[in-house]
Image: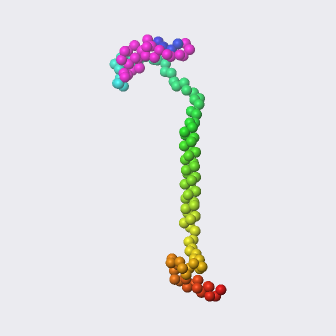
């Protein structure tokens, strides 16, 4: 006995007359997963999945926004890293203005004497 019609449409499910056992409905095991003690399981046609050539879901706006936001943050981080390395690798030199070296308290004495020598030779 088969539970499908002549066109292969199997819609009777567990109400199929081929499934005689009230415990396992003819599949050989009950709802708890244990084997049923019925005489023999019924031969019922199995219907496979019918989702052939499914189209992918459309991209959501939030996913596109988050992807562009992540790219922008990564680019900003790379720019900050490169600029920080550039500033760190520039040699540091201190320049003093000889016009204000005599009155400025932060100018070292060696620089003041050099400025005096340049002023007298010029």
Of residues 1 and 31, the one nearer the viewer is: 31
Residue at 38% x, 19% y is: 24
Image quadrant in which you'd find residue 63: top right
Q: Is residue 114 left or right of residue 29?
A: right
| Residue 116 locus on image (x, y percent) | 58, 85
- Residue 93 sits above or below residue 47 on the image: below
**In this figure, what is the number of numbered marks?**
0
- Residue range highlighted in magenta: 6-31
| Residue 15 locus on image (x, y percent) | 43, 14
| Residue 18 is at least partly visible in this image | no
| Residue 4 locus on image (x, y percent) | 51, 14
* In the image, residue 30 lies in the stretch drawn in magenta: yes
- Residue 48 sits above or below residue 78 on the image: above
Residue at 62% x, 85% y is: 119
Q: Is residue 103 left or right of residue 33?
A: right
| Residue 84 is at least partly visible in this image | yes
* In the image, residue 43 lies in the stretch drawn in magenta: no
Image quadrant in which you'd find residue 38: top left
Magenta-drawn stretch, dominant element (helix, strand or loop): loop
Residue at 55% x, 59% y is: 81
Of residues 78 and 29, the one nearer the viewer is: 78
């Amino acid at each position: 006995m088969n539970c499908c019609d002549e066109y292969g449409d199997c819609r009777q499910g567990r109400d199929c007359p081929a499934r005689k056992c009230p415990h396992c409905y003819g599949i050989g095991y009950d709802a708890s997963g244990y084997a049923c003690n019925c005489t023999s399981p019924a031969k019922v046609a199995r219907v496979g999945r019918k989702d052939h050539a499914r189209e992918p879901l459309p991209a959501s706006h939030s996913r596109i926004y988050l992807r562009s936001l992540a790219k922008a943050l990564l680019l900003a981080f790379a720019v900050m890293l490169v600029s920080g390395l550039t500033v760190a690798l520039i040699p540091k030199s201190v320049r003093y203005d000889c016009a204000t070296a005599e009155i400025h308290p932060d100018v070292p004495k060696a620089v003041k004497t050099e400025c005096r020598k340049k002023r007298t030779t010029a």
